[in-house]
Amino acid sequence: MIHVPEAEFDRAVEQALADLPVEFRPYLENVVIEVRPRPDRALMARYDVPDDVLGLYAGCPLEEKSLAPAGTSLPDRIFIFRDILCGMCESRAELVEEIRITVLHEIGHHFGMDEDRLEALGYD
């Protein structure tokens, strides 16, 4: 387990986003990235996720957006859970890498990738 200030954790999330290729950024304009300490009960129940989930994509994947009625799209959300990630890491370097993987994993869901595809890419 590692402890880092919230601002340092947030900077690592921002860096993971900044490292994305420029051509992906327009597809993330309607995505809100939110860091929370851990998932709350309502989030776990709504999305059927365990209390030790590292991140969560809540939205409509890009490939399905064209099927949604115009004007009904709220921003998609990606949740990154700070306490869970810090609890599994032993060093700052390991934490930064796990944050990067988690951010990319959840963005992958936004692009329509399933768990098998993300695992094949090394984002599990």
Image: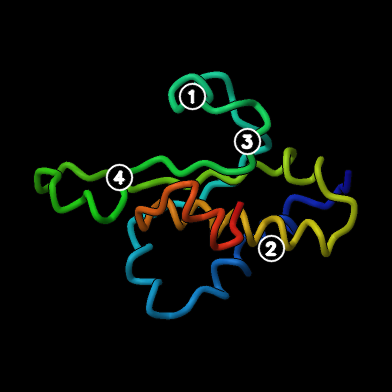
Q: Nearer the viewer, residue 72 or 100?
A: 100
CA neighbours of label 3 inside 10 A, class few (<14), some (14 to 19), many (20+): some
For badge 2, the amino acid type reads: Ala
CA neighbours of label 1 inside 10 A, class few (<14), some (14 to 19), many (20+): few
Provide the secondary structure element on which disc 3 rests: loop
Structural distance between the alpha carbons of marks 4 and 2: 25 Å
Structural distance between the alpha carbons of marks 2 and 1: 27 Å
Name the image quarter holding residue 87. top right
For badge 1, the amino acid type reads: Asp
Q: Residue at x 33, y 66 (%)?
A: 27
Q: Which residue is mark 3?
A: 53
Q: Residue at x 10, y 48 (%)?
A: 70
For badge 4, the amino acid type reads: Cys
Name the image quarter holding residue 41. top right
Q: Nearer the viewer, residue 21 or 34?
A: 21
Q: Which residue is mark 4?
A: 60
For badge 3, the amino acid type reads: Val
Location of residue 17 with respect to 56 vertically, above or below: below
| CB contact under 8 Å: marks 3 and 2 | no
Q: Residue at x 41, y 40 (%)?
A: 58
Location of residue 10 with respect to 58 vertically, above or below: below
Q: Which mark is residue 12?
A: 2
Q: Which residue is mark 1?
A: 48
Residue 95 percent coordinates (x, y): 78, 56
Structural distance between the alpha carbons of marks 3 and 2: 18 Å
Q: Nearer the viewer, mark 2 or mark 1?
A: 1
Q: Nearer the viewer, mark 3 or mark 2?
A: 3
Structural distance between the alpha carbons of marks 3 and 1: 10 Å
| CB contact under 8 Å: marks 2 and 1 | no
